[in-house]
Image (cartoon, helix red, strand yellow):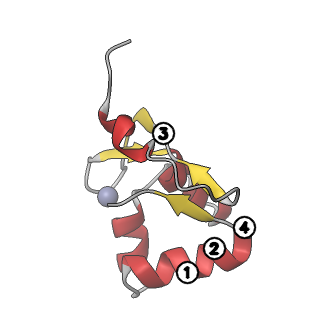
Amino acid sequence: MTKGPNTMFNKAKGDENLEKVKWLEERCNKCGCQINSWDRRISKTLAYHYPNCEKCIAEEYDMNVEALRNRMEHFFGMRPCMGI
Ligand SMILES: [Zn+2]
């Protein structure tokens, strides 16, 4: 395994509720960008057949990524640990 871009998510924040996000060997079904575990989780939650990245999902729901994260944060009771 090579070191992926996920190392940038490993900054400890001391918050138990933060979800560790990992990049996956999967692509967004819409724009083709690499997706991470957060993207896949929200895709699943929203009953997508194929995973989409959060940007495409947010677009589909006509909200920005921050609003989508806030909504999912309420839904899951946690927020993603990432800075993208
Ligand atoms: Zn996408």
Residue tagged 4: 76
- Which sits earlier in the primary sequence, circle 1 or circle 4? 1
Q: CA distance from mark 4 to mark 3?
A: 17 Å
Q: Position of residue 15 (x, y in %)?
A: 64, 59
Q: Earlier in the sequence, mark 2 or mark 3?
A: 3
Tell me the SS state at disc 2: helix
The residue that mark 2 highlights is 73
Give the quarter of the image for residue 27.
top left
Helix, strand or loop for disc 3? loop
Asked if residue 27 shows in the view, the reply is yes
Count residues near mark 3 (Cα–Cα under 10 Å), then give few for <14, some for 14-19, many for 20+: some
For the residue marked with disc 2, what is the amino acid?
A: Glu
**Residue toward you, 36 or 2:** 2
Q: Do the residues under discs 1 and 2 have CB atoms within 8 angstroms? A: yes
Where residue 43 sits, quadrant-wise, is bottom right
- Tell me which label, 3 or 1, sits earlier in the chain: 3
Q: Residue visible at 71% across and 74% down?
A: 75
Task: Point out the tag, 4 or 3, that comes first from the N-terminus.
Answer: 3
- Under circle 1, the secondary element is helix
Residue ID for mark 1: 70
- Image coordinates of residue 52 in percent, x first then y, are 42, 56
